[in-house]
Image: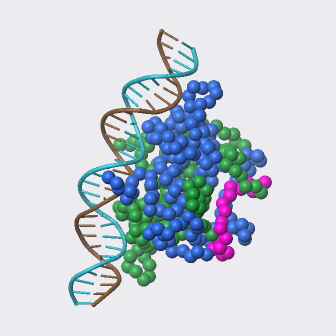
Chain colours: A blue, B green, C cyan, D brown
Amino acid sequence: MLSSGGMLGNRYEREICSAARSLEVVGERWSLLIIRDALFAGVSRFSDFARRLGMARNILAARLESFVEAGIMERRSSDDSAYDQYFLTDKGRDLAPIIVALTKWGDKWQAPNGPPIIYRHVACGTEVEQYVQCPRCNYNVKPDELGVTRGPGFGSGPLANRWALGRH
Amino acid sequence: MLSSGGMLGNRYEREICSAARSLEVVGERWSLLIIRDALFAGVSRFSDFARRLGMARNILAARLESFVEAGIMERRSSDDSAYDQYFLTDKGRDLAPIIVALTKWGDKWQAPNGPPIIYRHVACGTEVEQYVQCPRCNYNVKPDELGVTRGPGFGSGPLANRWALGRH
DNA sequence: CCGATTTAGTCGCGTGATACAACTAACAAA
DNA sequence: TTTGTTAGTTGTATCACGCGACTAAATCGG
């Protein structure tokens, strides 16, 4: 039973990749929608999440517990109620660009009637944009202008030669 | 059997949200890692995906088929081989910002030894950044400076009043 | 040309993840 | 005090996934 080779659940143990690390935290079903509601609809209580999302309550309980354990939410008791509430931490709020990126792609490719929800800069009300930028060229990099190299966290284990990339 | 109420599989039918639409296409286990390998490691063949990711071959076959059906990949026969290859379409390549966003979050919060993989502007080799921007203020918007309003695709069905938001 | 290996899957089975309904205990409202 | 709400937990059914075995065609080595 000392497996560690199993590919089950939410882990991607072979992957040397921060995207995989992120998906281990927020890649399961419902996870990013819970965080979306916390970030942009101000939802913080168990039954509000359950009602808005229409999801199973046991699964919601499991997700929220894993979020607290991962440090992207914290469970606090509010002043005016005996019931606890779930609030995003800084680490959790930092997931916003992921939700924006998912939304922008869905708006562009899966929304025939136009965007259902528009993300705006609260200070001025303008619709926001999202870019991958090259700070040197001051240029918005398109998908096929992106490449990869190894970084310091790459290591040198047996899995490290699966990426065919230079060191720049 | 005309259910339509079931919350199973990869659908989020109640959600009026482009992020949910995107997750219906690429939200299942392995999906975004397959696309990452296609985008940044140049993988295009069935067994190469399976080998690199260490995932079950029947699941991989199901994912690739759904990608072709969704229009984010196309299956083509190459000149020099009798085996087909899977290539991303423009729609599929446009998923790059999602992978970059996941990577940046993982780099910041889940990579104690530093980023394992660095995304660069191929033309100059500089590491790219990703921002949510307000084009009016010329300002990089932080997560808690983001708000939402309804867009033209919001509709007015019975689910449309679950968002507490103005029309700007 | 022929045997060995690789490719691109499919099939069947077991297990884990999810959905759903029912139940509970504490709290709140009337 | 009765009624309803909240925040779960538990049990069961179903679905998704992991895994090994199998296959047919293609390719490689000699």
- Residue A106 visible in the picture: no
- Residue B53 visible in the picture: yes
Residue drawn 51% across the image and 40% down it: A64
Q: Quadrant of residue A151?
A: bottom right
In the rendered view, tell whether residue B150 sits above or below residue B107: above
Residue drawn 40% across the image and 66% down it: B50
User: Which quadrant does the N terminus of chain B fall into?
Assistant: top left
Where does the image place residue B40, in percent across and percent down from the top left?
A: 54, 69
Camera-side residue of A43 and D14: A43
User: Which quadrant does the C terminus of chain B fall into?
Assistant: top right
Residue drawn 43% across the image and 64% down it: B53
In the rendered view, tell whether residue A153 sits above or below residue D5: below
In the rendered view, tell whether residue D7 sits above or below residue A133: above
Where does the image place residue A143, in percent across and percent down from the top left?
A: 60, 67
Question: Is residue B128 highlighted in magenta?
Answer: yes
Camera-side residue of B91 and C29: C29
Camera-side residue of B14 and B145: B145
Residue lying furthest right: B137
Q: Is residue B29 left or right of residue B109?
A: left
In the rendered view, tell whether residue C26 sits above or below residue A70: above
Q: Quadrant of residue D14?
A: top left
- How many numbered marks have been drawn onto this rendered protein structure? 0
Residue drawn 63% across the image and 74% down it: B122
Q: Which residues are magenta?
A: B121-137
Q: Is residue A56 left or right of residue B111?
A: left
Q: Is residue C23 left or right of residue C4?
A: right
